[in-house]
């Protein structure tokens, strides 16, 4: 009587045919797993905004972000330019509603710091220290201390690193040699003078139909970004678009696309809160149909909004607070909870500043020490008195 082990392989040829070969899928440019739950995320083009998205270190794919802004400033438009420029550099497909085609020439270009870091990463490093990995940064004098560090991700199994979030300069324009993706513009107002037939689609429905067809016919490795600037603004949308049955159906359709393609699509929308305040029912419904909601409140430049004296920046004018940031909801989907800004109450109030060197930076809001304003007023009065004759 012969004995053999259980679960032993009898014929190796049959087992080799039954186990299919698993080919490693190539990483998608501009996409990396979330450190929380591993879902794929992409960068918004602003490192400080990525860090606010509940620990995902980026905008999770299949989610939308609504940014409302008060006043006549266009800080939310700057975030859209960063969002579009990041997608163009990473090779993503951009779909813009309502803007003209000349907007692509207004996208910011790379900053000098980003170019230096990319050139260093491309150059072979033969003088790498052959000691423990934690001491490798000592050769370059330690880690970078910039406010917006360049985030990198592995681009292949060989160890090469690709930039996840680039740094852009608003005073420069994106070079055609750096563009890897495509951008398409869709009109938000029908240009025909004759009234629209009843059976024709509205600009909102036509936009959703075009984007849905491109998503269905594109490969699974293509990432798409939808940009909807200044939603319901009279400058870009007709009066019929502001009706609740039009705009809410449009947001419902975008939400359906996000749930249908959870690994291929992200959406960023801006809304003028001066025209549609948060106290109205329409705005609250629009916020409920979006996964993340931010609010920008611009401030007038004064001494109250100056940076704290502990700042180590050489030019404090660049760090001057230009507005406040309120987080109403966040695109979070995991068992640890979330979806609101309650977890960020411990960080206090948030503010933002926009400068050429550091870009759009979201940081905690500080008030100057008591009595500093009085000293500045006394200095100004003394200076004026010395000039009088």
Image (cartoon, rainbow, N blue to C red):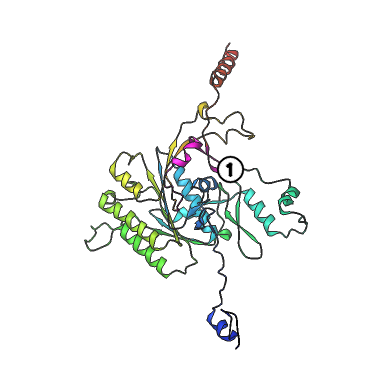
Q: Nearer the viewer, residue 272 or 7?
A: 7
Q: Seen in the image, is 162 located left or right of residue 34?
A: right
Q: Is residue 338 magenta?
A: yes
Q: Nearer the viewer, residue 275 or 68?
A: 68
Q: Quick one: quadrant of the C terminus?
A: top right
**Residue that mark 1 sits on:** 358
Give the secondary structure at mark 1.
loop
Q: Residue at x 38, y 45 (%)?
A: 271
Q: State whether residue 106 appears in this view.
A: no
Q: Which of the 4 image quadrants contains residue 74?
A: top left
Q: Position of residue 181 (x, y in %)?
A: 51, 62
Dot 1 crowding, Cα within 10 Å, few <14, some 14–19, many 20+: some
Q: Position of residue 72 (x, y in %)?
A: 40, 38
Q: Seen in the image, is 190 located left or right of residue 172?
A: left
Q: Residue furthest top?
A: 389
Which range of residues does the magenta coloring cover?
Answer: 334-363
Q: Position of residue 91 (x, y in %)?
A: 53, 62
Q: Quick one: quadrant of the N terminus?
A: bottom right
Q: Is residue 208 magenta?
A: no
């Amino acid at each position: 009587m012969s004995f053999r082990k259980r679960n032993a392989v009898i014929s190796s040829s049959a087992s080799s045919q039954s186990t299919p070969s698993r080919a490693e899928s190539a990483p998608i440019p501009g996409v990396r797993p979330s450190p929380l739950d591993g879902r794929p995320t992409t960068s918004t083009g602003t490192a400080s905004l990525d860090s606010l998205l509940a620990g995902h270190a980026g905008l999770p794919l299949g989610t939308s972000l609504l940014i409302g802004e008060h006043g006549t400033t266009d800080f939310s438009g700057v975030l859209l330019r960063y969002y579009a420029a990041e997608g163009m550099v990473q090779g993503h497909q951009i779909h813009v509603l309502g803007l003209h085609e000349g907007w692509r020439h207004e996208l910011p270009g790379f900053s000098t710091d980003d170019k230096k870091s990319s050139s260093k990463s491309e150059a072979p490093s033969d003088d790498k220290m052959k000691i423990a990995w934690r001491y490798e940064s000592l050769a370059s004098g330690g880690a970078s201390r910039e406010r917006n560090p360049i985030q990198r991700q592995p681009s292949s199994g060989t160890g090469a690193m690709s930039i996840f979030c680039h740094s852009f300069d608003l005073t420069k324009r994106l070079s055609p040699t750096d563009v890897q993706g495509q951008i398409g513009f869709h009109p938000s107002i029908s240009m025909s003078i004759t009234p629209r037939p009843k059976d024709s689609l509205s600009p909102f429905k036509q936009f959703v139909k075009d984007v849905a067809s491109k998503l269905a016919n594109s490969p699974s490795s293509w990432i798409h970004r939808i940009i909807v600037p200044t939603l319901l603004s009279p400058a870009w949308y007709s009066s019929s678009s502001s009706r609740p049955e039009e705009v809410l159906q449009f947001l419902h359709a975008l939400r359906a696309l996000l749930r249908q393609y959870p690994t291929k699509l992200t959406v960023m929308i801006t809304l003028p809160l001066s025209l549609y305040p948060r106290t109205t029912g329409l705005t609250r419904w629009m916020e409920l149909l979006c996964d993340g909601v931010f609010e920008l409140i611009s401030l007038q430049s004064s001494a109250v909004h100056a940076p704290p004296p502990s700042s180590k920046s050489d030019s404090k004018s660049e760090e001057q607070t230009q507005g406040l940031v309120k987080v109403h909801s966040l695109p979070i989907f995991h068992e640890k909870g979330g979806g609101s800004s309650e977890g960020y109450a411990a960080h206090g109030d948030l503010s933002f500043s926009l400068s050429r060197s550091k870009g759009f930076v979201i940081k905690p809001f500080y008030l100057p020490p008591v009595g500093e304003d009085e000293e500045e007023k006394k200095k100004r009065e003394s200076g004026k008195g010395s000039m009088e004759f």
